[in-house]
Amino acid sequence: MEQLNIKAIGIDDVVELQMIARETFSEMFADYNSLENLKNYLDEKFTIVKLSEELVNPHSTFYFAQIGNEVVGYLKTNTGEAQTELKDLNAFEIERIYVLQAYHGKKVGQLLIDKALEEAKKTTCTYAWLGVWEENHRAIRFYSKNGFIKFDTHIFKMGDDEQTDWMMKLEL
């Protein structure tokens, strides 16, 4: 396998971000949700306009995981008011870590979480947190292995389906 690189991205990468975001989210959740709920979620959350707004938010940062020129995953982090849930000025949110299924088990996710935590430690934040679907046992094991512990739950709406996410955190 070629060298894996983590690259910060910006507004010029929005089309490529939309493609990887839609593909990885679909791969992860298509088997667990109705086609209608999945399509509506993708059409609402992963539009060029919505992703462009997120990309230019000064409190959000995106990174691509690339092997050669191929984007195989991505990371989104938030601080301050950009956070999806807590909006705690002492918190660093890891909102999205998604990797193409063909690259699961190849350390791409580990490099992305390492990058997120490296960036978190450059801030004044005292902890990092994330949300993960309670049925995503593989991801829960991954985050637990990286020191995250469950501290709460919240509801994630996928169309008309309410799903429970674990909120997990790691003291920095």
Image: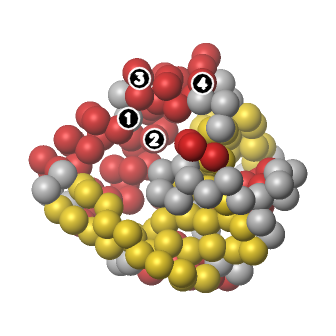
Whether 111 is drawn above or below 21: the answer is below
Q: At label 3, which amino acid type do we have?
A: Ile
Residue 63: % across, % down: 67, 40
Mark 4 or 2, which is nearer the eye?
4
- Frontmost of labels 2 and 1 is 1
Q: Which mark is residue 48?
A: 3
Q: Is residue 50 above or below residue 139?
A: above
Query: What distance separates the C-alpha of mark 1 from that of mark 4?
Result: 15 Å
Q: Which sits earlier in the primary sequence, circle 2 or circle 3?
A: 2
Residue drawn at (28%, 35%) of the image: 44
Name of the residue lying farthest toward the top:
12
Whether tag 2 and tag 1 are in contact, CB under 8 A, the answer is yes
Residue holding disc 2: 21
Q: Residue at x 40, y 43 (%)?
A: 23
Q: Residue at x 33, y 50 (%)?
A: 26
Foreground label between 1 and 4: 4
Disc 1 target residue: 46
Q: Is residue 25 visible?
A: yes
124 to the left or right of 75: right
Q: Amino acid at mark 1?
A: Phe
From the image, tell me which residue sits under label 4.
Answer: 56
